[in-house]
Image: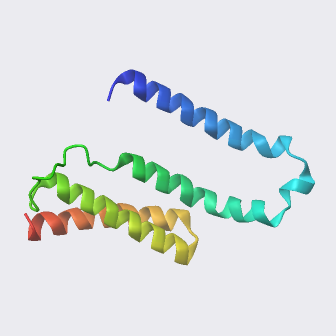
Amino acid sequence: MTSSYLIFATFAMAAVTFITRALPSLIPRKLLDTPWLHRLNESLPLSVMVLLILTSLSYQDLSATTALDSAELHLLMAQIGALLLVLLVYHISRQLLVSMIVGIAAINSLLWLLNNFLG
């Protein structure tokens, strides 16, 4: 990645964060109390977390000839498995911190399992 991309991405994330934090103070209170907005607010942390994980998936080094015992494929499989587990845990518990901890543990555990048993 180039440094200009990282700088742009950082400023874009900062702008989105600022807008989403400032927006509730600009919207009338009556609109903020609508049920659809409450449901959106409940699913927003999970949506942001999923988007961040999806953008970090490492599939660039994969090709049609990538072997099942390659480290690149193991990493992608571990990332997808951890993402699915995070979604499941968040759906059950509605706890973002617990989901993140499970995701970190899952990706490391899955990488260990894949590297020790498939590669």
| Picture quadrant of residue 44 | bottom right
Q: What percent of the width, then of the height, locates residue 10?
A: 50, 31
Task: Say above or below: 15 vs 4.
Answer: below
Quadrant containing the N terminus is top left
Q: What percent of the width, then of the height, locates residue 108?
A: 27, 62
The residue lying furthest to the front in this view is 64
Q: What percent of the width, then of the height, locates residue 57?
A: 33, 50
Task: Say above or below: 21 vs 6.
Answer: below
Position of residue 79 in the picture relative to residue 113 (left or right): right
Residue at 48 percent across and 51 percent down: it is 51
The residue lying furthest to the bottom in this view is 92
The residue lying furthest to the top in this view is 4
Position of residue 74 in the picture relative to residue 7 (left or right): left
Q: Nearer the viewer, residue 101 or 6?
A: 6
Q: What percent of the width, then of the height, locates residue 8?
A: 49, 26
Residue at 18 percent across and 52 percent down: it is 72
What's the image's color scheme? rainbow
| Picture quadrant of residue 110 | bottom left
Q: How many discs mark residues in the rendered view?
A: 0
Is residue 105 among what the camera can see? no
Quadrant containing the C terminus is bottom left
Residue at 18 percent across and 69 percent down: it is 113
Is residue 31 among what the camera can see? yes
Position of residue 17 in the picture relative to residue 37 (left or right): left
Residue at 80 percent across and 66 percent down: it is 35
